[in-house]
Amino acid sequence: MSVVTVQLGQCGNQVGLELFDVISNDAREAQRRTYGSACYDRFFHQTTNGELEARAVLIDMEPKVINHSMTKAAKSGKWRYGEKSHFSQKQGSGNNWANGFCVHGPRNKEVVEELVRREVERCERLAGLMPIMSVAGGTGSGVGTYVTQCLRDTFPKSFILNHLMWPYSTGEVIVQNYNSVLTLAKLYRLSDAILVHENNTIHRICSQLLNIKHITFSDVNRVIAHQLGSVLQPALTQDSYGTYSRNPLGIDWQVRPPSNFERTRGLPTHNFNRSLANLLILRGKDVYSAETGNFEEPALYTSWLPSNEAFNAWKSTVPFDKYEKSATLVNNSQSLLLPLDNIVEKAWNMFASRAYVHQYTKYGITEEDFLESFTSLEQVISSYRHLC
């Protein structure tokens, strides 16, 4: 089954480029034909000339990043983007979510929907759609949210996984907290799943683990692409019976408490991140002898979901990205509580003082839209904070 990515804004297009490069290199390095074939079928299709073309749509309100991405992909000699799989114009969204969501998104709705529909129709079997975007900027977050809304309307039965980049806590643009709150509140209702990478965490990986002295955005994007690729590449699941899973979005994202569940009052007493679910993906040597029992410890999970259901392990004996052994953990836990709470608090303080609100209302976002977004995210924060 195939995945169509939708690369949105500067961040989405840069991460998407690195992701396809990682996947292409990994498929070429793999010594097993079945694995390589599954990789290509999932993320590429072959042209009549036998070239690999990414199953992707590139969207930005300015052409520079898209032009760079398409040129770099073509120069790799391994794969390329489709010549007609992109859209840009000459004016950006000015780091304003409302400008992207209310103006640029609706203005270009038909052409973007047609680009995505064309890619979907080229898939024999569609696993889902994966928008890649930042939550902080104007095009990535504003247009990205609008495009996700269109995807939900146009492909109501398709699985939508949004991959989001969380901004640096020290700030990239002054209104990034507004943009983040509006994005997250909308996507929480539109998406089937949201996968988040935090810039702060990735920066620490570059500095402390990779020992990079002068960290660039390219360094950060390569780490993100490596981690994302390690999740999306083929692996054997518990019920795949020796055949590579054909659905890279096949994680059970729909964990919900039973209908008679009553939320515990008061703060939890534990001092660690309680989880709804963990997925461990092991690749390379010794994957079938690796000890994973600690991940089944009931204390890690909520009381209403058995740990043997909350924890899953996927495995592949094929090394990933030249690493002899690798392990990736996809975690649905309380770890994002603090950064989410910080963003909501900062955005609320700005809203209470009326800072920059007029820059959003002039494009059609109302104060009620802000209040609904705050309410939605505060409910998410409360739900995760009181996991028990």
Image (spheres, rainbow, N blue to C red):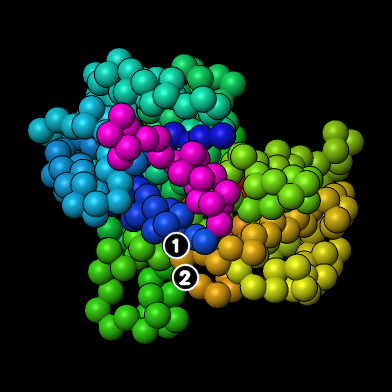
Q: Nearer the viewer, residue 329 or 47?
A: 47
- Quadrant the N terminus occupies: top right
From the viewer's perspective, is 45 left or right of 108? right
Which residue corresponds to the image point at 69% horizontal and 52% vertical from the top-left?
Answer: 236
Query: What amino acid does circle 2 point to?
Result: Lys
From the viewer's perspective, is 304 left or right of 183? right
Residue sticking out furthest to the left: 90
Q: Nearer the viewer, residue 181 or 36?
A: 36
Q: Nearer the viewer, residue 202 or 227?
A: 227
Which residue corresponds to the image point at 23% horizontal and 37% vertical from the top-left?
Answer: 60
Whether residue 209 is situated above or below residue 45 in the rendered picture: below
Q: What numbered label is drawn on residue 291?
A: none
Query: What amino acid does circle 1 point to?
Result: Glu
Whether residue 265 is situated above or below residue 226 in the rendered picture: above
* Residue 53 placement (x, y as % from top left): 33, 38
Whether residue 210 is situated above or below residue 40 in the rendered picture: below
Q: Nearer the viewer, residue 341 or 252?
A: 252
Whether residue 21 is situated above or below residue 7 in the rendered picture: below
Res. 53 in view: no
Q: Is residue 106 magenta?
A: no
Residue at the disc numbered 1: 29
* Circles 2 and 1: CB atoms closer than 8 Å: yes
* Residue 171 placement (x, y as % from top left): 31, 61
* Residue 227 placement (x, y as % from top left): 49, 61
Total labels: the figure holds 2
Residue at the disc numbered 2: 322
